[in-house]
Image: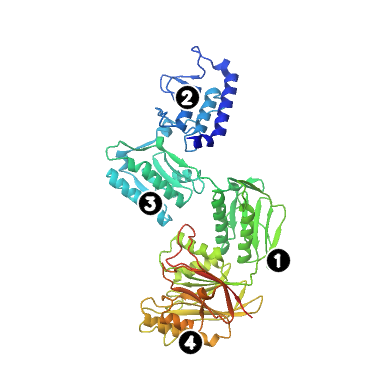
Amino acid sequence: MFGKMKKFLPLLITFLIVFLSAAVITAGDTKKDNGEIGLAAESQGPVLGDINGDGLVDVSDAIALFQHSMLPDLFPIDYSGSLDLDKDGLVNISDALRLFQYSMLPDQFPIEWGTEEDTDAALAMEDLKSYIIVRSSFASRDLQRAANSMRNTMTINLGIQLQIKTDSSSAAVPSEYEIQIGKCNREEALEFFGDLKLSDYGYAMVGKKLVICGGSDEATVEAINAFTEAVVMKLNGESDIFFSNADAFIHRATYEIETLTLQGSDISEYTVVYPADNASAESIAEELVKQISQKTGTTLKLKSDEEPSSGREILIGSTNRLEVVPEEGTYRIGAEGDHVYACGVDGTGTYYAMCALAELLLETAESNREVVLEAVQEKEVPMDQSLKAMSFNIYYDSLTKQRKGSVKQTILNYLPDTLGVQEATKEWMSYLNSALGGVYDSVGLGRDGGSNGEHSAIFYKRDRFELIETGTKWMSETPDEVSKFEESSMNRVFTYALLREKKTNEEIMVVNTHLDHTSSAAREKQAAVLIGFLKDYTQYPIVLTGDFNTMPGSRAYRTVTELLADSSEIAEKAEIHGTYGSSVIDYAFVSEENINVSSYRVITEEANGMQPSDHYPLIIESNISK
């Protein structure tokens, strides 16, 4: 109790000061015949704001609301209207203060009471049977599960089974009776969503629609769980009312940065703009939006420069709004008019420019942050001498919007110099080339020839490397044509890329593969073909990544380690973890005589709200020894 009082102490002091001041000012003007101060009832019916039912709206009503907001069990209220007078989704001291101000000076402090329909909006149990549940077709898997769980709980507790439809299905035409989940394409849901920050969530009737929504999919899951616990699980089939707005609820989260202004304007006034037909810049812009949202709770609108300018904008990359031309090897951040910009010569430079802008905006301990860019900042793009190589089995199936974003974000979080992917289908390759194309080029054919089948492709930073030689080989008796060993369940390939570093002219052989998952005999033969090929390139430093589908110590593993070293064993610092569950079957092997591995790490954290794949990616950092 005392913790709660302490939280609201400043507001309580304000309440008392205003109370005493207003009482002195208005006592002579509002005193009634019976000696009470307040607004007399103008009708025979109930008066909105008359909490204690005495026919007046006065200080005693504000005190009653204050007591109820602090200790609702000790001070219950029998009042049919809404107690959320400031419409923030909560009933607390601020509502009592609002009512007090209104009771003393109604013209100066008016209250929008809303219509009777707004205050008493309710959904009858009988009407619930006609409702459908509508969610976004882009909803995350967790949100889908939460919605299904809520529907199942309704069936068990109430004996009412509702359909769940997406907003792009036959329910695309709005129905009169809907429970709207999350940010779906419904007017009511979008209206409710517009008042939420990232981690805020709640539920309420909006007209005849029941909206259950959060500022993100994760927050919407919290809203669904809260609604299920507070409403659905407390009802039974004998209840007449399923839900009324007297039980509406909004949770307001706290954020590391409560207010952020940029060039004197609130950050919410900005739109983030990226150049059209530049998927890499779009991905970088999305990352900035995400970082701002996580720190402030405000999710900025994102659009391409094909759309017309709309007030204040943050420009990512080279857009048609301003001509920003950094010098080669540099990036710029600055401001001009209504525009703030972060731009590099290429995708890598733009990424570092975005990171610099994000750091300027967000890397602070201040809860109220004011940022002003007064001069153009031009800095060199970092060119680390170390080489970062990542191996990532991205899983061929379930290419949901969230999971694609998770894979992309994992890669951008570490920005490796080379990336070997496994199980990259034609659809995956199309997406990755688009999403990463501003930073990376890729090489590699599908295992069934051309673009068909899964790729064991290699992505490399185009600003750092020049491609000297590349190819895809089939691990079989005929490596130059689509083929397989009899023991193998399917065609298996490796892709190689001989790269020259532009700054140092050093050359490195990068190889990526995926061995068979069913036959150890097949894996032994495939490993032998792979190593036989690499023996012709031992004059170069070699990095070999891949999903080998085999544990350390197996025959296939020993075949590889006759030529190359397991980076997890020779790294100066190694964070070892299973790469597929608790098993280690993904590797990065290197030629130990000319590559020093400083770090090895299996990446286990989520990205974009989920694990990106059924495998954990791994990344090594190394240096070529002279």
- Find residue 582 and report its image quarter: bottom left
- Look at the image and name its color scheme: rainbow
Q: Position of residue 348 (x, y in %)?
A: 61, 66
CA gap, disc 1 and disc 3: 50 Å
CA gap, disc 3 and disc 2: 40 Å
Mark 2: which amino acid?
Asp
| Mark 1 or 4, closer to the camera | 4
Give the labeled residue for mark 2.
Answer: 61
Q: Position of residue 227 (x, y in %)?
A: 39, 44
CA gap, disc 1 and disc 4: 45 Å
Mark 4: which amino acid?
Gly
The answer to whether marks 4 and 2 mark residues whose Cβ atoms lie closer than 8 Å is no
Give the labeled residue for mark 4.
Answer: 532
Q: Is residue 160 visible?
A: no
Badge 3 crowding class, 10 Å Cα cut-off, few under 14, some 14 to 19, many 20 or more, is some
Give the labeled residue for mark 1.
Answer: 327
Q: Secondary structure at mark 1?
A: loop
Horizontal relation, residue 437 to residue 448: left or right: right
